Amino acid sequence: MALSKADQIVAAARQYKSQREQGYREQALKLYPWICGRCAREFDHKNLPELTVHHRDHNHDNNPSDGSNWELLCIYCHDNEHQRYEEQVRYGGSNNGGEKQEEATFNPFADLKDLMG
């Protein structure tokens, strides 16, 4: 028995969804809270397309299933991170006149364990 055109479309959509869920974005969204790791902006289903997966080592082929090379960043923080990386590669470091840049101390997940307990 041949599948109808509608059944073929549904089967193809289910197969595509299954493949996509195995991709690193879907894995990262299941592993991590929907919060930007830099600015702590929170996301829901409406604005989720603005939350991106950043590869910490900038190697998009390095996708361990434990998520250790990923962090979720909003599109603005993700663009900023890549711009800083490009400047470091191009100019050999930061362009802030040799001054040491302060590292961020805010951790949006610091009390997560207590909140979930």
Image (tube, rainbow, N blue to C red):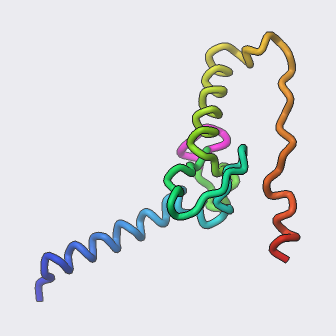
Viewed as shown, does residue 116 lie left or right of 86?
right
Q: Residue 86 at what x, y percent from top left? A: 60, 24
Viewed as shown, does residue 3 lie left or right of 22?
left
Q: Is most of the magenta stretch helix, strand or loop?
A: loop
On screen, residue 85 above or below 106: above
Query: Residue 113 appears in which quarter of the rendering?
Result: bottom right
Q: Residue 57 at what x, y percent from top left? A: 66, 39
Q: Quadrant of the C terminus?
A: bottom right
On screen, residue 96 above or below 85: above
> Does 61 appear in magenta?
yes
> Does 43 appear in magenta?
no
Closer to the camera in the image, 7 or 78: 78
Query: Residue 4 appears in which quarter of the rendering?
Result: bottom left
Q: Residue 88 at what x, y percent from top left? A: 68, 21
On screen, residue 92 above or below 85: above
Viewed as shown, does residue 8 lie left or right of 105?
left
In percent of the image, x 65 and y 34: which residue is there? 81
Q: Provide the residue span drawn in magenta.
A: 55-62
Name the residue at the bottom extreme.
Answer: 1
Viewed as shown, does residue 94 lie left or right of 73?
right
Closer to the camera in the image, 72 or 27: 72
In percent of the image, x 56 and y 42: which residue is there? 75
Q: Quadrant of the N terminus?
A: bottom left
